Image (cartoon, rainbow, N blue to C red):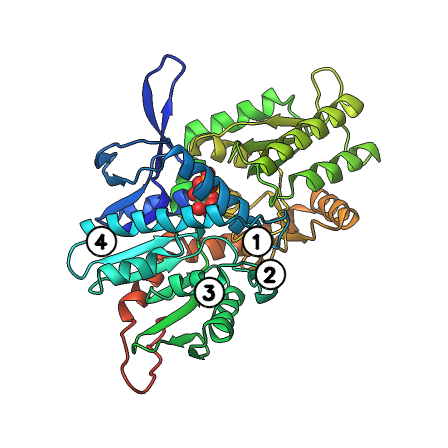
């Protein structure tokens, strides 16, 4: 059973008033959907709409169990504590986190609701896999209700260093909440180490390497499981005739430029969209790219639109794009083709196929699956990936042209290097990265996590480290 804040589909109201289910935004859903399709089980989550009391239903073969959130809970639990407190705190305080006691109270209430629902429907001895920062109290709450369950937790975003985490007034409760799981998974090993260290310092439990020993005799394992994508599925889509045609159409619609640069992100202040567009516009201004034969396509998927910091970001990006195109664009030839919209997988694959250079520049990112999707779609071993060293993916995609998004001049130089790279160099890098994402796809990620979870046993007495599966 999966427990995540969002169901894989959102309920949307069309202009004619009719309702429809649409795929939810974000990396969590793109990663977990194929995993659930190849396993039996239910997915518990929110439908994305206030007060939605939809009964459990089956959508496209997936058993979905909605958990309702009221308008006030959306403001306090989702927009407030999850995205106004935890999100910036866990992303290097790129924006200032806000701490409000009412937001915390709502976080506790909603986490309890998810735990109650999971406890109600989980079969005896079932495996429950809880996801992400919105639900960090659920492992402990669920264990209290159903000690028979095997509980795993995976954090899709970074886990901060102690110096930042300690700002959180409810730091101990969060750590104890996570310790309700048998296995706590992170994207990177540094995050798992941060967690274990904090547990030792703040909760006072005994730890040894990646294990925490609880007073009740349980052992909790904290380890890294870098998430991935459905590599074969993306490659197959990219090879399809319709994507090939669409990619050609996209290039033609852009005026058949020599170079297409591409950015695809949720419109989020952690993604470094602003410095990326500034860097590119300066390259155009300095004459390194010519607006008549190159274009930067930036897709920004609308996200968390009622949260103040996201509104400000949207205005900032709108203004920046307007200014760059106004100053440097020509009729029918913008410097930046900016699309504030969400696209289905088919269109994304066509964009990846159409792009010569993919530019991904987050200030901090748990993984960044777009980077892996781009690589999966480049079966021709061509295309250049420019990637921030602060994305989790940089750990695996070492052959990418890596940049520091805080260093605009460095970023400009690296984009130019990628643009002027020779075919052989690009093929060498792309082949190596394709090997990584082919060998380590989302199915192997889920298998590793679930196999490790199955191997975790409570130990009474002398601490014994459960065998880590390879
Ligand atoms: O992967 C991070 C994440 O926050 C997911 O938990 C989430 O579903 C996704 O990004 C999209 O964000 P949201 O659900 O707030 O639209």
Q: Report the Cα–Cα distance between label 2 and label 4.
A: 33 Å
Q: Report the Cα–Cα distance between label 3 and label 2.
A: 14 Å
Q: Report the Cα–Cα distance between label 2 and label 1.
A: 7 Å
Q: Which residue is mark 4?
A: 119
Q: Quadrant of residue 260?
A: top right
Q: Report the Cα–Cα distance between label 3 and label 1.
A: 15 Å
Choose mark 3 or mark 2, whichever is in front: 3
Q: Residues within 10 Å of mark 2 (few under 14, many from 20)?
A: some
Q: Which residue is mark 1?
A: 89
Contact, CB < 8 Å: mark 2 with mark 1? yes
Q: Report the Cα–Cα distance between label 1 and label 4.
A: 30 Å
The label shown at residue 399 is none
Residue beneath the point at 51% across and 35% down: 304
- Lower sequence index among marks 3 and 2: 2
The label shown at residue 172 is 3
- Lower sequence index among marks 2 and 1: 1
């Amino acid at each position: 059973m999966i427990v995540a804040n969002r169901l894989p589909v959102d309920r949307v109201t069309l202009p004619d008033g009719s309702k429809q289910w649409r795929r939810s935004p974000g990396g969590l859903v793109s990663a977990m959907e194929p995993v659930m399709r190849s396993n039996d089980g239910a997915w518990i989550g929110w439908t994305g709409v206030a007060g939605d009391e939809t009964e459990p239903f089956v959508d496209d073969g997936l058993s979905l169990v909605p958990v309702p959130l009221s308008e006030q809970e959306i403001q306090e639990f989702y927009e407030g504590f999850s995205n106004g407190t935890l999100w910036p705190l866990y992303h290097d305080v790129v924006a200032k986190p806000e701490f409000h006691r009412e937001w915390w109270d709502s976080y506790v209430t909603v986490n309890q609701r998810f735990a109650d629902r999971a406890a109600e429907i989980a079969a005896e001895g079932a495996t429950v896999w809880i996801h992400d920062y919105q639900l960090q109290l659920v492992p402990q709450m669920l264990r209290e209700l159903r000690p028979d369950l095997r509980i795993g937790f995976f954090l899709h975003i970074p886990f901060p260093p102690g110096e930042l985490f300690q700002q959180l007034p409810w730091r101990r409760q969060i750590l104890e909440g996570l310790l309700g799981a048998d296995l706590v998974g992170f994207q990177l090993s540094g995050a798992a180490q941060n967690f274990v260290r904090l547990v030792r310092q703040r909760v006072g439990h005994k730890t040894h390497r990646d294990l925490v020993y609880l007073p009740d005799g349980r052992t909790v394992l904290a380890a890294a499981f870098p998430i991935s994508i459905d590599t074969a599925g993306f490659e197959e889509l990219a090879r399809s005739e319709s994507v090939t045609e669409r990619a050609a159409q996209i290039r033609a619609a852009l005026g058949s430029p020599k170079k297409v640069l591409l950015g695809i992100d949720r419109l989020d202040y952690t993604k470094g969209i602003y410095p990326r567009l500034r860097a590119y516009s300066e390259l155009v201004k300095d004459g390194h790219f010519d607006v008549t034969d190159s274009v930067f396509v930036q897709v920004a998927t609308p996200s968390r639109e009622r949260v103040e910091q996201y509104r400000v970001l949207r205005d900032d990006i709108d203004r920046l794009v307007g200014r760059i195109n106004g100053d440097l664009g020509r009729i029918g030839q913008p410097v930046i083709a900016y699309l504030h919209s969400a696209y289905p997988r088919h269109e994304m694959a066509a964009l990846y196929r159409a792009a010569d250079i993919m530019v991904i520049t987050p200030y901090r990112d748990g993984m960044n699956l777009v980077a892996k999707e781009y690589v999966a779609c480049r079966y021709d071993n061509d295309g250049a990936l420019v990637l921030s060293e602060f994305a989790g993916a940089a750990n695996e995609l070492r052959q990418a042209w890596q940049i520091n998004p805080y260093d605009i001049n460095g970023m400009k130089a690296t984009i130019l290097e990628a643009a002027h790279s020779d075919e052989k160099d690009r093929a060498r890098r792309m082949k190596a990265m394709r090997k990584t994402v082919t060998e380590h796809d989302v199915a192997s990620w889920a298998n590793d996590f679930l196999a490790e979870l199955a191997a975790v046993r409570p130990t009474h007495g002398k601490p014994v480290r459960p065998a880590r599966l390879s």
